Each structure stands twice: as C-alpha cells, then as structure tokens.
Image (spheres, coloured by chain):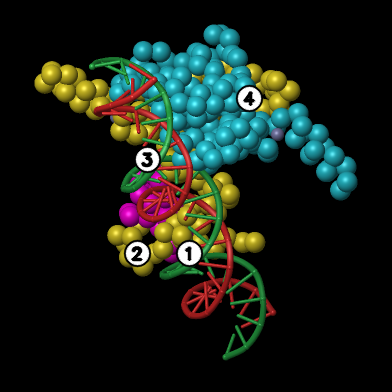
Chain colours: A cyan, B yellow, C green, D red
Amino acid sequence: MQLRMTNQREMILRELKKSKGHLSADELYERVKKFMPRISLATVYRNLEILSDARMIRKLEISGRQKRYDSVLVDHDHIYCVECHRIENLELGTSDVKLPVGEAKGYTITGRRLEVTGLCPVCQKKITKSKKIK
Amino acid sequence: MQLRMTNQREMILRELKKSKGHLSADELYERVKKFMPRISLATVYRNLEILSDARMIRKLEISGRQKRYDSVLVDHDHIYCVECHRIENLELGTSDVKLPVGEAKGYTITGRRLEVTGLCPVCQKKITKSKKIK
DNA sequence: CTTGACTTGCGAAAGATTATTATTTACGAT
DNA sequence: ATCGTAAATAATAATCTTTCGCAAGTCAAG
Ligand SMILES: [Mn+2]
Ligand SMILES: [Mn+2]
Ligand SMILES: [Zn+2]
Ligand SMILES: [Zn+2]
C-alpha cells in the first residue's frame, strides 16, 4: 500500500505541526475546517491513524477520554494539568528517569509512557483567587 | 453522604480484590454476574466510580480504550504488553525514577503515571514460534 | 410503621471512534 | 495528456464505552 499525499492529509499534517500542541481529532477537525469546510471528521480520524502508522506523527495514550496526537517524533514525556487538561512537553534528562532497560518481569521492554500530573500556573492562580473569595 | 455497603457493592469490591488484576468494568460485570445474575452494568460502573472516589480502589488511566480498576491502593506503576494488553504491577525502587518533585514548568506536581510497555513472556514465545513457521 | 436518603435495574443518551459505501482523486504507466 | 486503478473522501451508520434519568427498592433512624 502506498501513501498518497492528498490535500486533506497534507492539511491535517500541517495544522498539527503548526499547533505545536497535543490536539484531539475534533480540535484538529475544527482547525482544518477553516480551510476545507467540506472535510469530514472521519477523514481526520482516518488520516491521523494512517499518519501515526507511518510514523509521521504520534498517537498519544494519555489521561482523558479523547486520544491526542503529537507532531513531535522524538521521545519525550508530558505534564498534564488535572484541572484544565492542558498537556505540555516535558524534557527530562537521562539522569531523571532510570528505568529497567532490557527487561523486567520477563518482559522485553519497548518503551515507556510517563505522565507527570499537576496544576498548571493558570489553574493555580484561579484556585488561589477562589479561595480568597471564600 | 454516607456509603452503604450493599450486596452489589460488596461483591464488586470482593471480585476486584480477588482477581488481583486490572479489570475493566465489563470484565468485572461478567464475573459478578455469575453470582448476581440480575446486576446491571450501570451498577458496576456507578460503584466503581463511588469506590474510587472513596479511595477504596483506584481508577487507572492507562493505554487502551477501556478504563481499568485496581484494588491495590499503594502507589505503584505498571507494565503493559503491547500485544495482548495484559497489565502487571511494577514495583520500582525509589532510585529507579527521579522526577522533578515540587514543580516543573511552573506546575505544582501532584503525581505521576508511569507505564512501561513491552512484550510479555507469553507473547514473546508466540512471536518466536510464528517466525519459525515462516 | 413511616420517612427519607441512598441504591438499584433498566433503558436511553452521550461521546469517541470505526466501518460501510458510493463517488472522487492521485499518480504511475501508456 | 490521457487512462486505469488502487487509494482516499464525504456522508452516514454502526459500534463501543460510559454516563444519565427515573421509577421502584432498600435500609436505618425516629
Ligand atoms: Mn508532546
Ligand atoms: Mn496495579
Ligand atoms: Zn490548568
Ligand atoms: Zn502479551
């Protein structure tokens, strides 16, 4: 099977890269629709699947009900705001995480998913304010 | 609001603890149904939510479409087979993972989720066999 | 026994993703 | 440039997981 670079696929890829974020399929759909009003949500899903199979993007398994997609291909971790569900990249030095490489529990290890959870600066402020009101 | 320990709730809790695994709501439903044929799936979902709010079990945010529930309350991580989706506990020493405590990127850190991915022993064997056939 | 808060079972609804299908399109070969 | 065809699209239906709404049931306190 050979990949064709259709207008839709190109646009989806471009918008994901442009955003620098971790968009869900429907967020991406809303953005792409600005330029291609007739595109279908299923097309966005289909292409995100195809593009991640082709290792041109990454599908993130992350907290929350919706899957998110990342245009950054190099390995990295994420930090997640438990309040507003914002996701940001987290660059950890090699000394920060020492994981069993090779094997553990008889498993052949292929990777890891590390998600640090916390409160983002914006949500911290909101909470501080709401406490003052009380 | 006070929790009542109903038969259904007790059974759900018992079966989750008995399994020692990381069951999804519908897996648990199937098991409980053996003893309580008239129980509703919604009751299982409702109680899993209530029990995890009450910190009697933990709801896991992990790879896969379905949420999974854990009867082990102490902090621990997981290892996940990318082939058969089995999930096992992973006890990592404090020296294994050094994460930014306190804050990073302006976030107030509240926790972490670490998921090591790999191939379980069973799936390794299966793959080795299928290669031999070729 | 009566009251009222907590629960249940059931069906419907919601939300996210995938499948189906008729039609269109990209692109290598002619 | 045109053609043939496999790949892709739009629209829609279907599926899967989880939650919701509500009438009926349960239980503890008074
Ligand atoms: Mn990222
Ligand atoms: Mn566990
Ligand atoms: Zn936030
Ligand atoms: Zn496996």
Q: Chain of mark 3?
A: B
| Some atom of ligand 1 lies within 8 Å of the CB belonging to the residue at label 4 | no
Label whose residue precedes the other's in the sequence (1 or 3) = 1
Q: Looking at the image, which residue sits at the far left?
A: B133
Q: Distance between the Cα atoms at labels 2 and 3?
A: 21 Å
| Residue type marked 2 | Met
Viewer-nearest of labels 3 and 4?
A: 4
Q: Chain of mark 4?
A: A
| Residue type marked 1 | Thr
Q: Quadrant of the C terminus of chain B?
A: top left
| Residue type marked 3 | Gly
Secondary element under disc 1, as helix, strand or loop, is loop
Q: Is residue B134 covered in magenta?
A: no
Crowding near the residue tagged with mark 3, few <14, some 14–19, many ≥20 C-alpha atoms within 10 Å: some
Q: Distance between the Cα atoms at labels 2 and 4?
A: 50 Å
Label whose residue precedes the other's in the sequence (2 or 3) = 3
Q: Name the disc covering residue B6, or none.
A: 1
Crowding near the residue tagged with mark 1, few <14, some 14–19, many ≥20 C-alpha atoms within 10 Å: few
Crowding near the residue tagged with mark 2, few <14, some 14–19, many ≥20 C-alpha atoms within 10 Å: some
Q: Which residues are magenta?
A: B7-31
How many labels sit on residues?
4
Is the magenta region chiefly helix, strand or loop?
helix
Secondary element under disc 3, as helix, strand or loop, is loop
Q: Name the disc covering residue B21, or none.
A: 3
Kindly identify which residue carries mark 4. A19
| Residue A38 in sight from this viewpoint | yes
Viewer-nearest of labels 4 and 1?
A: 4
**Discs 1 and 3 share one subunit:** yes
| Residue A52 in sight from this viewpoint | no
Q: Chain of mark 2?
A: B
